[in-house]
């Protein structure tokens, strides 16, 4: 009996021992895997993260800096702004402003403003007529421009001269190119839009009028591309005349107008609703010349009436 009982006891104890051994092996494997995971950087648990990162830009250099910008509303015109950055402890009482640059030779212009300490202010100015004979890419004939601000002081006046920064030079160069393009186009043709009276269809066809400035002949002027605005999509229809021929004094070139965005936000926030740009290929030029052409008051009203109807009056004002 005892022998049988002993055998039974050994069998009863053998099963838990096997289970314990198996459990020990599983735990060891698990611990090994955990140990391996923590030592492997590719399997490491991600650390704590933040919702956002705050980047503090370095403080502006103390002193006075000058630049040139152009607001979007002034695109296609000779209007620009002289940007004055006043990182000093005192106010600047500006009396005259200007830019010294061979591309835009001209005097300073009166502009009475106060630029407070630590403030940045854009002061409107009209650029002088461009000198289109200058090679603006040649540093010898057109060195970097200098901004000028004449300020009033307690004992008279002071003239602040600062080099225009890189961003301002990009503006100036682009404005010079556009001004010279306008002069060249104006010497050849007068551009205007003819907007039809009937504006009740889903698509509107207006015409770009080209009238030679002098004489009945001249180089061919081809319309190669058009660009509209956020409210009006412009495209060339692919049919009809697309150029003022050398033996003609005028041409009427069709341009298709489709409604752009019809939402109220676009209508109310559009800063240039009818600022349309055209690209012309003049004579044997290898590059296009661009020009901004604005409809007259009547044309603008008809275009907006077309937009209201095409959009189902969702943007009517």
Image (tube, rainbow, N blue to C red):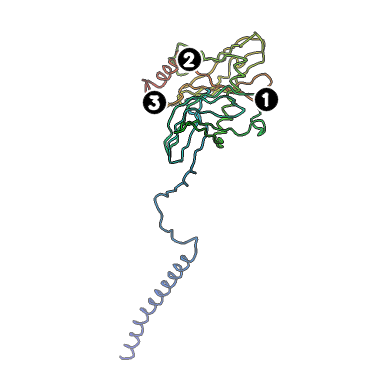
Asked where in the image residue 137 lies, by quadrant, the reply is top right
Q: Residue at x 54, y 24 (%)?
A: 127
Q: CA distance from mark 1 to mark 3?
A: 40 Å
View extreme (front): residue: 155
Which structural element holds mark 3? helix
Q: CA distance from mark 2 to mark 3?
A: 20 Å
Which of the marked residues, 2 or 3, is nearer the chain's N terminus? 3
Is the residue marked by circle 1 packed among few (<14), some (14-19), or many (20+) residues within 10 Å? few
Q: Is residue 31 above or below residue 210?
A: below
View extreme (left): residue: 1
Q: Picture coordinates of residue 28 (x, y %)?
A: 43, 73
Q: Picture coordinates of residue 6 (x, y %)?
A: 33, 88
Asked where in the image residue 214 lies, by quadrant, the reply is top right
Is the residue marked by circle 2 packed among few (<14), some (14-19), or many (20+) residues within 10 Å? few
Which structural element holds mark 1? loop
Residue 296: image tag = 2
* Residue 251 left/right relative to 96: right
Using the image as rendered, state which of residue 36 and residue 1 is in the foreground. 36
In the rendered image, which residue does mark 1 sit on?
286
In the rendered image, which residue does mark 3 sit on?
268
Tell which tag, 2 or 1, sits nearer the viewer.
2
Q: Quadrant of the N terminus?
A: bottom left
């Amino acid at each position: 009996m005892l022998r049988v009982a002993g055998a039974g006891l050994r069998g009863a104890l053998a099963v838990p021992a096997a289970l314990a051994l198996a459990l020990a092996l599983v735990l060891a494997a698990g611990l090994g895997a955990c140990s391996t995971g923590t030592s492997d950087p590719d399997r490491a648990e991600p650390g704590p993260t933040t919702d956002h990162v705050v980047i503090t830009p370095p403080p502006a250099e103390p002193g006075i800096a000058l630049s040139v910008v152009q607001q979007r509303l002034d695109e296609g015109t000779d209007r620009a702004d002289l940007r004055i950055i006043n990182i000093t402890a005192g106010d600047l009482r500006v009396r005259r402003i200007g830019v010294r640059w061979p591309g835009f030779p001209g005097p300073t212009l009166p502009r009475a403003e106060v630029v407070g300490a630590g403030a940045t202010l854009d002061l409107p100015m009209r650029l002088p007529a461009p000198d289109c004979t200058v090679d603006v890419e040649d540093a010898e004939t057109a060195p970097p421009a200098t901004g000028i601000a004449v300020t009033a002081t307690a004992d008279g006046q002071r003239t602040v001269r600062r080099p225009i920064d890189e961003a301002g030079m990009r503006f100036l160069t682009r404005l010079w190119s556009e001004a010279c393009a306008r002069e060249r186009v104006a010497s050849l043709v007068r551009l205007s839009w003819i907007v039809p009276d009937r504006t009740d269809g889903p698509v509107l066809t207006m015409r770009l009028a080209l009238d030679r400035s002098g004489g009945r002949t001249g180089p061919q002027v081809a319309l190669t591309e058009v660009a509209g605005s956020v409210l009006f999509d412009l495209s060339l229809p692919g049919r009809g005349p697309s150029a003022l021929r050398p033996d003609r004094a005028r041409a009427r070139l069709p341009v298709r107008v489709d409604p752009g965005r019809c939402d109220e936000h676009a209508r109310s926030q559009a800063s240039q609703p009818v600022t349309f740009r055209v690209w012309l290929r003049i004579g044997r030029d290898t590059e296009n010349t661009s020009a901004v052409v604005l409809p007259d008051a009547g044309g603008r009203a008809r275009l907006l009436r077309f937009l209201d109807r095409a959009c189902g009056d969702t943007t009517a004002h």
